[in-house]
Structure formats: structure tokens, C-alpha cells
Image (cartoon, rainbow, N blue to C red):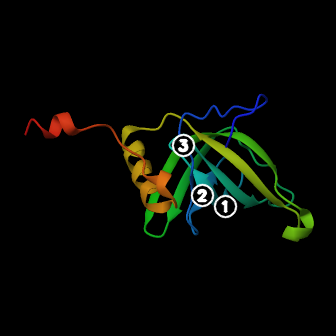
Amino acid sequence: MAESMYYSDRREHKRSPAANGVTAVLIASAPEVIGSVIDISMGGVKIAYHEQKNTNLDFSELKVDLISDDRFVEAIPCKNAWNYEAGDKALHGSGDLRECGIAFLDITPNQTFLLRGFINRCCRGLQANIAGPDLSSIAGNQ
């Protein structure tokens, strides 16, 4: 995307479009939210979900589980970056489709390793190959 004088992308990590079937479960003190992952990076995830009627979602303390077939990363601490109604109500029938951006927080080294592998295996496109730390100097000493 070309930068304009009104917008500049401040993301630290490149986003990769998720393959079909990648699911996110947002776990909060309120009812959990299950949605489809639209795109993902090492810094966060964009999720589409259907809003439940007559519920107040509590986005103050969140964890997210990412699931795709036999792969998963669980209990990633996160926060809600944004949340809005998605698309045309007529297109989606009930009009309750929403999208939200989730920013990962305080990811452990193990979660970082699992998340990197999850992104590399569950995303489409060339930019999905997320590199890990350079281990060549360690490998050369063996």
C-alpha cells in the first residue's frame, strides 16, 4: 500500500493473509468470541466474527487461541486495538458481522516460537515466511 500524506503504516511486523479455516477464540471474562482470522503477524491478528445479541463483551483482559487443523497456539495475552461493524448489512444478512484488531502482549519465547511456525504453515502468499532469530553462528560452533 502506498503511503499518503494522511496515512502511514506504523506496523512493526508484516501482515500475512490467513488461509481458509484459521480460527481465533478470544477468551475474556465475558462470553468467548469465535471468529475467522483474516490476517496475522507476529504483532497481532485481524478477526471477523458475528456479534452475539444482548451481550456486553469485556475486552479488558483478553487471551486468544489460534487454531488451524492440527496446529494451535493457545493463551496468547492480547488487547483489543480496534473493533467495528464490517461491510454492508444487506450483504451479510443479519448485519452483526464485525472485525477487530488484536495486538499481542508479553508473548513468551515459547509462544513466539509456536506463533512463528503457525504463521509459516497457516498463511497464504510469499510474505508468510516469517524468519526466526539467526542461529547460524551457533550452528557453526558444533
Upstream in sequence: badge 2 or badge 1: 2
Q: Residue at x 39, y 53 (%)?
A: 117
SS state under label 2: strand
Q: Which residue, as the protein is rendered here, is positioned at the far left?
A: 142
Upstream in sequence: badge 3 or badge 1: 3
Picture quarter containing residue 131? top left
Label 3, on which residue? 14
Residue 4 in picture, x, y percent from top left: 75, 33
Categorize mark 3 by other alpha carbons within 10 Å: few (<14), some (14-19), many (20+).
Answer: some
Alpha carbon of mark 2 to alpha carbon of mark 3: how far? 19 Å
Q: Residue at x 70, y 35 (%)?
A: 3
Residue in the foreground of this view, choosing between 90 and 54: 90
Where's the N terminus, which quadrant? Answer: top right
Alpha carbon of mark 3 to alpha carbon of mark 1: how far? 21 Å
Where's the C terminus, which quadrant? Answer: top left
Badge 1 amino acid = Gly
Categorize mark 2 by other alpha carbons within 10 Å: few (<14), some (14-19), many (20+).
Answer: many
Residue 35 is tagged as 1
Closer to viewer: mark 3 or mark 1? 3
Q: Residue at x 84, y 68 (%)?
A: 92
SS state under label 1: strand
Upstream in sequence: badge 2 or badge 3: 3
Q: Which residue, as the protein is rendered here, is positioned at the far top?
A: 5
SS state under label 3: loop
Badge 3 amino acid = Lys
Q: Are marks 2 and 1 in contact (CB under 8 Å)?
A: yes
Categorize mark 1 by other alpha carbons within 10 Å: few (<14), some (14-19), many (20+).
Answer: many
Closer to viewer: mark 2 or mark 3? 3
Label 2, on which residue? 24
Residue 10 in picture, x, y percent from top left: 63, 31
In the drawing, does residue 6 fall left or right of residue 60?
Answer: right
